[in-house]
Image: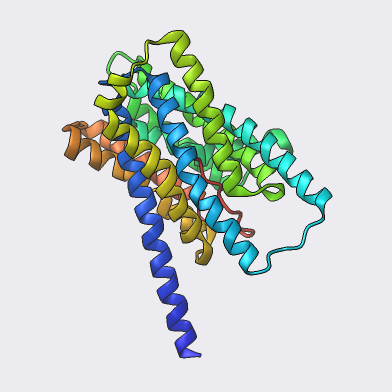
Amino acid sequence: MKQNSQNNAGGQYRSSLLLFLAASIWGVAFVAQSVGMDYMGPFTFNGARSLIGGIVLLPLIAVRERSRKKNGGEAETPEKKKARRKVTLLGGCCCGLAICTASMFQQYGIQYTTVGKAGFITTLYIIIVPIMGLFFGKKVRRIVWAGAALAAAGMYLLCVNETLSLNKGDLLVFLCAVIFSVHILVIDYFSPKADGVKLSCIQFFVAGILCTIGAFLLETPSWDALVSGAVPVLYAGVMSCGVAYTLQIIGQRNLDPTVASLILSLESVVSVLAGWVILDQTMNGKEIFGCVLVFAAVILVQLPGKKPQPVAEPEI
């Protein structure tokens, strides 16, 4: 009995570490996105990173399929398999459209704000999602409204300057958070009926194709630019989309959803530290206090109520 308890504790520690690594990778990805803008346009960067992310997930899909066949897997009728494939494809296309739009707002926004601010503003999706649930007949807990008020105060301190005007970049990243919230609701609808990893892979390919089309229409993409900016593009594609997503899948197996979402929220803190250490971006006292309020709001809405509900994750 004691041995089982120790094994469970060890498994939880390992899972927590894996999720922290995922949050760290995503936090540093804001730096990669900012640096990538020195070499190419937003559509080119997002197109390349998304296509790479889709390619990186292909081996994971192959390994899971092989493991499923080896272990017997769940016996499905041809009709069920066909229906699941159809739902996975449709869900991947819908998620791809949403994540493409959100990523473009984020990528344009990062050009006009710091990576630290972008990280904290993006994290607001955790508060926006339950409020959006009102449109689908879901009840919003009082603690969520308290978190929303706290987040609004934090956003004011973080984004509104002395002339009471809102920074263009902050507004674009906030719109990104809103669309990421829509993306999460779309995932919430399709994920019970589809293969999660395949859905994610399809969404990256769809987002990559859409962004690539936008790049050729609105920008002048070149192979030289991609080679020059290979490091941030590869980091965003391989590490953020592929590695971090895999760590999240493995890490959440043995961990309570509330604890998992709290650990993943550290992405915003890592983004500030990464912006400071790598890009030498700093914040004043007012902005730091705003970050503290936003992070407190994010933690507050994830505290379990009478009926704890899992918090869905954005994608990368």
Where in the figure is residue 83, as x and y percent of width and height? 78, 44
In the displayed structure, would residue 164 be above or below residue 157?
above
Which residue is located at x 40 percent, y 62 percent?
16
Where in the figure is residue 106, as x and y percent of width and height? 42, 26
Residue nearest the viewer, comparing 77 with 282 = 77
Q: Is residue 159 left or right of residue 203?
A: left
Which residue is located at x 53 percent, y 22 percent?
210
Residue nearest the viewer, comparing 146 with 12 = 12
In the displayed structure, would residue 261 be above or below residue 111?
below
Which residue is located at x 36 percent, y 61 percent?
17
Q: Is residue 187 left or right of residue 208?
A: right
Which residue is located at x 33 percent, y 42 percent?
27
The answer to whether residue 316 of the structure is visible from this angle is no
Q: How many marks?
A: 0
Give the quadrant of residue 239: top left
The answer to whether residue 51 of the structure is visible from this angle is yes
Q: Is residue 281 left or right of residue 219?
A: left
Give the quadrant of residue 218: top left
Where in the figure is residue 44, as x and y percent of width and height? 40, 21
